Amino acid sequence: MQDKDIPLSIELSGWSPFIPTDDDNSSLPVGALEYKFTNTCTAKVSAVFSFNSRNFFGEQKGKDSIQPANKGFTLKGTGNGETTFPTDFTIFTDDKETVVDHCWFRGGWWDPFTMAWNAIRDGLVVDNPPVPADAPGASLYVPFELAPGKQKTIRVMMAWYSPQTQLTFGTPGKKKEGCDPASGCCNSPADIGLDKYDKDFDGKFYKPWYSSRFNGIEDVAGYWAQNYNTLKAKSQLFTQAFYASTLPPEVIEAVACNLSILKSPTVMRQFDGRLWNFEGCGDDSGCCHGSCTHVWNYAQAIPHLFPALERSLRATEFCEDQAEDGHQTFRTNLPIQPVAHDFHSAADGQLGGIMKVYRDWRISGDNTWLKKIYPMVKVSMDYCIKTWDPRHKGVIEEPHHNTYDIEFWGADGMHTSFYLGALHSFIAMGEFLKQDISAYRDLQAKGKAMIEGELYNGEFFIQEINYTGLNAKDPSKEKSYGGAYSKEAETLLKKEGPKYQYGKGCLSDGVLGAWIGRMCGIDDVIDSKKINSHLQSVYKYNFKTDLSEHANPQRPSFALGNEAGLLLCTWPKGGKLSLPFVYSDEVWTGIEHQVASHLMLTDNVEEGLNVLRASRDRYDGRVRNPFNEYECGHWYARALSSYGYLQALTGVRFDAVTKTLHIDSKVGDFTSFLSTETGFGTVSLKAGKPSMKVVYGSIDVQKVMVSRREIAMSS
């Protein structure tokens, strides 16, 4: 930052701890701003730095206060006990010259701000002691002198502590009695070997994880001050390794900007340390609660950056959220506890969860964890079969709830790709554990024939709408978020079939299960050429370079006018229903990243980059925030599909079960970031020779496969 009236050049850096594999230090309620001043003139400069804050907790007159802290001050809010609760926010430095004004001038109108500004304007250093209550604001001052060419850095450190809430979601269910994990029944993380998350907590309301580690704001601030340099150095290791990448800049930007989601209120850790997430955030509350499985399916960052936290989601899905018959709710209660199973399971969410168990096993290399969770996975797999494929055709045809918040009736490419991926994952895990998986192989073979035949129109995969001859009898009577059918809707049902289908449409998510499979380390279960054809069709028909002529009666602010974007669905061969699935006319960045990275995986790199560029061009800072790809709320989780670009372009992934590093470059020579269960660093490919640089922890690579051929690692 520069100003003609200030004879200093100034740099501002903001950061908070972010150290892949170090879950706890990356979850601290802290942040910092560093101001670096350089004297660029020929004379000594005398200056006063100040950091000023109004008391943003000042709602409880006579109670809220500003108290002293070591080289700073603490804003203390007592809360009203109903919607707000005791919260402390500390602002401090490590500079011994720091002086604190604990209480701004008290008066009406803008008196406090005016007098605070007068002090700044005049270069004053105000030293006021604390008062019992009602201080309107506080300032800290650091006076300093700087010789020509010299530098000074002032750290402003912040920490907060808000241990109580009245935050709760969901309808409690009953704890499973006589639960035997070996028979597929799980009540807690300890049942599947995750003892770390088995803390004793049975409160009615959400309490943040850090309240189980720290007793108060003094503990948090003390830890922050004591470990600041170490945490910064480790965080910089991540920054340096990540930005050492030679991948296209728009790829790095998309991945990096969306990692901000992990530091937003979208992502939370409850008292026992487990993750619990919203889909996104409103301005003053979360949006769509409960680590929604069909949305978090898309998110690929946490399983690689913080694998243990990702496995805590599996613990919740297969323990508290899974009934004894295998039904999984797709929204978790808060605090995490047994749920009421009073609505559909989400087919994409539950089937995706089985694939993610396979992925998490390969990332962690924890065979004991797999052995313990497998019985629950089998119960889930069997539920999926009996619920959505009761006639054992190998396709999902009974009405199936999904990420579009409706139910598809009849077999479709999207969910059959999930089904085949889940079957493939289950078979691979079962084989490793020496289980009989022959019946599941038969289903997989049937499903492969069906999706490549009846559900493929020669160009892309479709849906065969069907609501007769099923176990479910009447679409107008089934539970649905859309509510009961009106008289007009019943007339439409007789004419076109159930509302909210995609039928003959070209669906951008049409082979989503295949993409998730590749992200999980699963080879294509469906004919790769047909997957490629589907993706090329999506690019041809759904990617629009100008949306000016596109009518969107839904939420057009995601992409509109002369902007480019990837539509969720189009009907290039006709057959669009009067009421296709909700959201069909929208553009979602999470799906754009999914499709773009899948295009890259299938050697359509330039097409994938075109979709990515269109998405990021809309978030260039002029109209939309580059760090906030919104959908149903800010910092929307689906956008974490962007992390898949790293694997899509390089093929880099580490299989901790076989200790094999896989590389399959789509861009020739490269350097790219890799994070594993035990460490992180960079992987490079130069003239066909692989190399790896581990900068944190360790990565026990014993074999390297480049484009499916074993090659020795360069030293």
Image (cartoon, grey):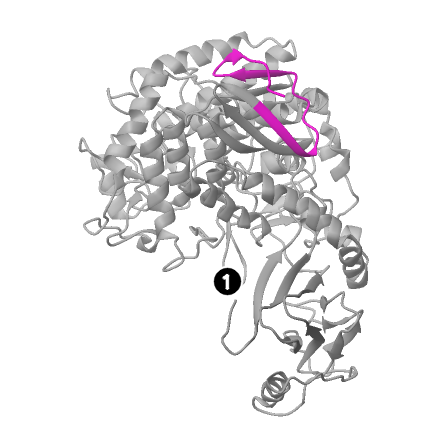
Residue 166 place in picture, x, y as percent: 66, 60
Q: In the rendered view, does 351 fall on the left or right side of 622?
A: right
Residue 97 place in picture, x, y as percent: 77, 73
Residue 670 place in picture, x, y as percent: 48, 29
Q: Which residues are magenta?
A: 691-715
Residue 424 place in picture, x, y as percent: 50, 17
Task: Note whether 557 is above or below 648 in the view shown.
Answer: below
Along the line of sight, the residue nearer the viewer: 501 or 264: 264
Residue 41 appears anywhere in the view: yes
Q: Residue 504 lies in what quarter of the image? A: top left
**How many numbered dots are placed on residues in this image?**
1
* Residue occupying image coordinates x 36% and y 33%: 408
Q: Which residue is mark 1?
A: 283
Q: Residue 435 lies in what quarter of the image? A: top right
- Pointer 1: residues within 10 angstroms few (<14), some, or many (20+)? few
Along the line of sight, the residue nearer the viewer: 519 or 675: 675
Q: Residue 704 lies in what quarter of the image? A: top right
